[in-house]
Amino acid sequence: MKKRTTSRSQSNSRSTARKRPTGRARPRSRSPLSQEWLKEFLSEMLAVEHGGVELYERALEELAHDELRARLEQYHEQTQRHVELCEEMLNAAGGSEGEMSPGAEAAEHKAQGLLSAQVPEHMKDINNLENLVLAETKDHWNWELLASVMDKIEERDFKKVVTRAVREVRRQENDHLTWAQKMLTKLATEAAQHQPEMEEGEDEEEAGAEQDL
Ligand SMILES: [Fe+2]
């Protein structure tokens, strides 16, 4: 069988013949995870879920399209559950909800930025759905990343907590993101086909302005 060589080992072989260590090399993907990275990442995940709860609450408070209410309420409730699961994972990793990692602080800052954007009344549902798409994109990515690295967790009990949480949440995150994207497209398409209703008196003001020209 042909030996695998890298450009580095090829150049080395010209000068000094270096022997490979015997036995199979441990694949890079099996390296254990940094506990510190995990704690910081779970703190960030928790902050993203907290932001999500607030964004669902805002969307429900300002909702004009009542046909979206049931789903928003369901996803709001599920996101509250995700907060609990993130707290559980963070505690199992030896972290605490009271301490925010730099990534968590950034996530909180971004959520507050989304919540602070002001739009006219007729754009509120679209704006809130757009915020949900942005937040759920990150949320979905977080859980997918966690799922992709959880096999590398070495501590058994902690790994069990993470595996259970991922199993419960992963599908829901996918639903949250795809639904928000779909509804945003639906509302934006409707808006593209309808002029917003004029405020009372707006037509008279406009007519007056035209006469002045
Ligand atoms: Fe979530």
Image (cartoon, rainbow, N blue to C red):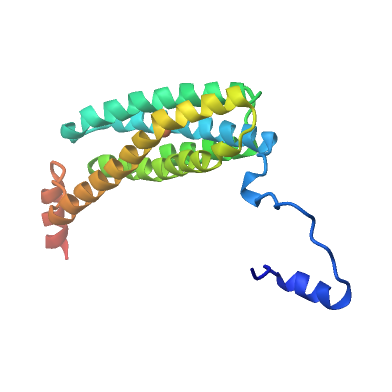
Q: Position of residue 192 (x, y in %)?
A: 18, 56
Picture quadrant of residue 76: top left
From this view, report whether residue 130 is shown above or below residue 41.
Answer: below
> Which residue in the rendered view is the most extreme toward the front?
1
Residue at left offset 88%, top offset 72%: 16
Seen in the image, is 22 located left or right of residue 149? right
- Picture mark count: 0
Residue at left offset 77%, top offset 70%: 9
Task: Determine if residue 61 is in view.
Answer: no
From this view, report whether residue 69 is shown above or below residue 197.
Answer: above
Picture quadrant of residue 43: top right
From this view, report whether residue 2 is shown above or below residue 194.
Answer: below
Closer to the camera in the image, 158 or 205: 158
Seen in the image, is 49 located left or right of residue 151? left
Closer to the camera in the image, 192 or 204: 192
Residue at left offset 27%, top offset 41%: 179
**Ligand 1 positioned in quadrant:** top left
Q: Where is residue 125 in the image (x, y as percent from the top left)?
A: 26, 40
From this view, report whether residue 118 is shown above or below residue 167.
Answer: below
Task: Determine if residue 108 is in view.
Answer: yes
Seen in the image, is 104 located left or right of residue 165? right
Quarter of the image containing the N terminus?
A: bottom right
> Which residue in the rendered view is the most extreme toward the bottom?
14
Seen in the image, is 206 located left or right of residue 143? left
Q: Position of residue 133 (x, y in %)?
A: 36, 44
Quarter of the image containing the C terminus?
A: bottom left
Closer to the camera in the image, 17 or 147: 17
